[in-house]
Structure formats: structure tokens, C-alpha cells
């Protein structure tokens, strides 16, 4: 049976892709951000996961408002990175794991999570930036695991509740642990932390709230389910709702985790950037 | 925000328009045009003939006026969703910080300082 090694969260700001391309690792603006990743690289090298579940939110590449799934799961052989409208060079496709995808889909629907399955899915910065951060050179990294993307809607309200996100993660855990292959799996939760791009409140960042979330998500994620969606928008900013992905990841890790590393830095682009690596106990 | 009573599911968060069903109904044409800017040929077509391209997608006058005046807040009021508008901002060569400054009455430098001040 498969094993869940742990979970890694990171912000997935588009500007990071650009900074990676230009190798700005020691640039004074970027250094405090990139310094959060060497311990993650070491952990990945030591553990070498076979599969990566990448929980992210699409920002208007894979899905439009004509059909907006609340939870979508990729079931493709590969996932193409495409132009998001800014004409940036796309990365080569990421290898998929359709057998694992369908196993997850079967298990989640049996557990009454009515997901949308996607045999074609273009993946945007929300998916690829974390891959580039964790597996340098991705997808052309010899340790690059095969991927299953899971996207949750944070584009259009109503978005899922934090409680639903955590429970989705728990159901995902059950699915992964019953996958009949002796495989090692890592779960990513990407996006966040506090930021707001739109409106007169653009530029809003909330360090205190982010720290509260970072503290509780490690050992007390249930506490965070008390936060309403409206309060999440108010406290984390309109796009800080991406914290839902962190909750989904956390649900997949089980009760006991060990924190391996954490980083938090304000600002990267318009965002409070957070990174967290939790190993399953 | 009181134009469609019965559709207010939200608390008031100053300076924030929640993109919900009400905004989604209002902004569909605008957002669809912006979504299609994922393709380079559509970006070029817009640049070549803004009015014609807006008409093709059936934008209303409020949406057209907001685009003509490059007024981000007006685009949001007209139902625009920031993730799709970001593609339009790219055509106008506006960075995320430029867009932040434009919405908050700051220069880009002032907006960047505001971000850093929250560390």
C-alpha cells in the first residue's frame, strides 16, 4: 500500500517563475524568500517521493466561468503549462499518473465528494511554480515525481468552507493510503498567504492572521475550521482565500506531524509568502 | 451594491468587491473577453481594434468605458474578476504593483513601499 510522506506548502506567485528563470536567488529582494527552500530540497532528496499530489487553485487558464468546478482532479497522462496571457515561455509538460488519479476519484466520490474529473487540464503558475521551487529544473529533474493536480475554486464565490477543505484532505488521505502500490507520496498545498489584488484594499497583508494560521495548521487545524469564508476574505485578503489549499493538504497528513521547516516573508510581489514542510509522524 | 436586492450573501468588507454570482452575471462578457486573452492572437486582435473586439464580445457601455479609460476599479464594478483582468493588464503592460497603485491612488513606488511596510 502507498504511504504519505508529508506535505509541503508554498506561495505560488507568478513573479517567482520569473525570478527562477533569472536565477535571482541571491538578489536582496528574493534571498529571504528562496532561503526557505534548501531544507525542502534536502528532505525531498532524502525521501524521493514517487508521486506528488499538487493541490492548487486555477487562475483562469484551466477553467473559465462557463463551468467552474468547486473541486477538480486531473486524470491525464500529462499536464501542459500554457500561456496565461502574458506571453511567458511555457514549461514542458508534467508527467501525470492517471491510474492514481482514477483511484482517488473513485474513493472520493464513494465518500460523497462530488468532484469533476479532467482528462485534459492546462496548468498555470499555481501548479508549476511550486514544482519549480521544490524540484529545481522541473519538470526536467531526475527526481520529478508523477503528478496528480487537484484544483479548488477560489475564483468565484461561493468558495468551499475551511471545514470542507480539511475534510476533503481527510478523504484524500483515505484514498491515497488505499492505493495498491508500494509508493511514496507527497502532498502539496499551494497559494497564500494573505494578499489582495483587487479593489481599494489592494495591497492588504495581515501578518498577525498569517501567523495564527501557520501556528494552528501544524497541530490544531480543526481550530481554523471556525473561520468563516467571509472572515477569511476579511482577514487574509480577497486572494488569501487560497489558504484553503493548505487546509486540504493538512487534512491528508493525519493527526500527528513533525514540522521540518517554515519560512515567512513580506512581501513577494503583493503577497505574504509562506512555506511549511510537515512530515507525517 | 444595492442594485440587485436579495443577492447579498456577504458581510461588508471595505474596499473589497466579492466576486460572487451577482458580479459573475454582470461581468460575464468582460471576463470572457479577458479569458480569451490567454491566446496571443486574441491579444493582438484587441490591440489592433479595441472597439471592434469589445463589440464582438458584447461588452456593455459601462465595461467599454472602464476599458477605454484604463480604470481598474470601474472594471471591477462592471463585473470584472481580477484574475481575468490581470490578462488585460498584461496587454496594457501593467504589473501587479502598477495595478495596485492605480486602484489605491498611489504611485507604483508608493504601493511597493506600502506592501513592504506591512512586514
Image: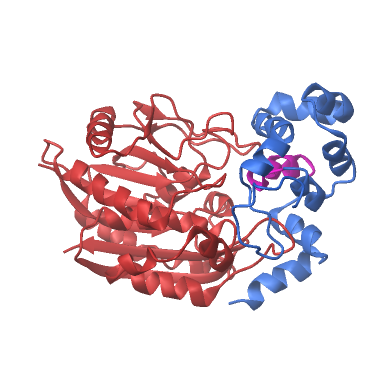
Chain colours: A red, B blue
Q: Residue at x 77, y 27 (%)?
A: B44
* Bounds of the magenta segment: B80-93
Name the quadrant of the N terminus of chain A: top left
SS majority, magenta: helix
Q: In which quadrant of the rendered view does residue A7 lie?
A: bottom left
Q: Residue at x 43, y 75 (%)?
A: A212
Which residue extends farthest front?
A: B6
Name the quadrant of the C terminus of chain A: bottom left
Place of residue A24 in the rendered image (x, y in percent of width and height, measured from the top left): 55, 59
Place of residue A23 in the rendered image (x, y in percent of width and height, measured from the top left): 53, 55
Place of residue A166 in the rendered image (x, y in percent of width and height, measured from the top left): 33, 55
| Closer to us: A79 or A150 | A150
Q: In which quadrant of the rendered view does residue B86 lie?
A: top right
Asked whether residue A25 is in view, the answer is: no
In the image, A268: left or right of B69? left
In the rendered image, residue B92 lying in the magenta stretch gets the answer yes
In the rendered image, residue A19 lying in the magenta stretch gets the answer no
Amino acid at each position: 500500500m502507498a504511504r504519505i510522506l508529508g506535505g509541503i506548502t508554498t506561495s505560488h506567485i507568478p513573479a517567482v517563475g520569473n525570478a527562477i528563470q533569472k536565477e535571482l536567488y541571491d538578489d536582496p529582494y528574493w534571498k529571504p524568500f528562496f532561503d526557505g527552500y534548501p531544507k525542502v530540497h534536502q528532505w525531498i532528496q532524502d525521501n524521493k517521493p514517487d508521486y506528488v499530489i499538487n493541490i492548487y487553485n486555477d487562475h483562469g487558464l484551466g477553467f473559465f466561468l462557463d463551468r467552474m468546478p468547486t473541486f477538480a482532479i486531473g486524470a491525464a497522462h500529462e499536464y501542459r503549462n500554457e500561456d496565461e496571457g502574458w506571453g511567458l515561455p511555457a514549461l514542458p509538460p508534467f508527467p501525470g499518473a492517471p491510474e492514481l488519479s482514477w483511484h482517488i476519484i473513485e474513493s472520493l466520490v464513494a465518500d460523497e465528494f462530488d468532484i469533476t474529473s479532467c482528462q485534459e487540464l492546462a496548468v498555470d503558475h499555481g501548479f508549476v511554480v511550486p514544482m519549480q521551487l521544490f524540484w529545481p529544473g522541473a519538470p526536467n529533474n531526475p527526481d520529478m515525481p508523477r503528478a496528480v493536480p487537484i484544483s479548488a475554486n477560489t475564483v468565484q464565490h461561493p468558495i468551499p468552507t475551511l471545514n470542507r477543505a480539511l475534510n476533503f484532505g481527510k478523504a484524500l488521505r483515505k484514498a491515497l493510503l488505499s492505493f495498491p502500490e508500494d509508493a511514496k507520496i507527497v502532498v502539496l498545498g499551494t497559494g497564500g498567504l494573505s494578499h489582495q489584488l483587487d479593489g481599494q484594499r489592494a495591497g492588504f497583508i495581515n501578518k498577525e492572521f498569517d501567523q495564527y494560521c501557520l501556528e494552528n495548521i501544524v497541530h490544531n487545524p480543526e481550530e481554523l475550521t471556525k473561520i468563516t469564508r467571509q472572515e477569511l476574505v476579511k482577514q487574509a485578503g480577497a486572494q488569501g482565500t487560497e489558504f484553503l489549499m493548505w487546509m486540504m493538504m493538512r487534512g491528508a497528513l493525519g493527526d500527528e506531524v513533525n514540522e521540518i521547516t517554515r519560512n515567512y516573508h513580506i512581501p513577494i510581489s503583493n503577497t505574504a509568502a509562506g512555506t511549511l514542510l510537515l512530515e507525517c509522524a | 451594491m444595492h442594485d440587485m436586492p436579495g443577492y447579498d450573501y456577504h458581510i461588508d468588507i471595505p474596499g473589497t468587491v466579492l466576486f460572487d454570482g451577482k458580479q459573475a452575471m454582470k461581468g460575464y462578457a468582460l471576463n470572457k473577453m479577458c479569458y480569451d486573452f490567454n491566446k496571443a492572437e486574441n491579444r493582438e486582435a484587441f490591440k489592433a481594434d479595441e472597439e471592434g473586439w469589445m463589440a464582438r464580445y458584447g461588452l456593455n457601455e459601462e465595461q467599454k468605458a472602464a476599458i477605454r479609460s484604463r480604470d481598474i476599479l470601474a472594471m471591477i464594478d462592471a463585473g470584472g474578476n481580477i484574475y481575468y483582468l490581470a490578462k488585460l493588464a498584461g496587454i496594457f503592460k501593467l504589473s501587479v504593483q502598477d495595478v495596485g497603485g492605480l486602484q489605491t491612488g498611489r504611485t507604483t513606488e508608493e504601493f511597493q513601499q506600502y506592501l513592504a511596510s506591512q512586514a
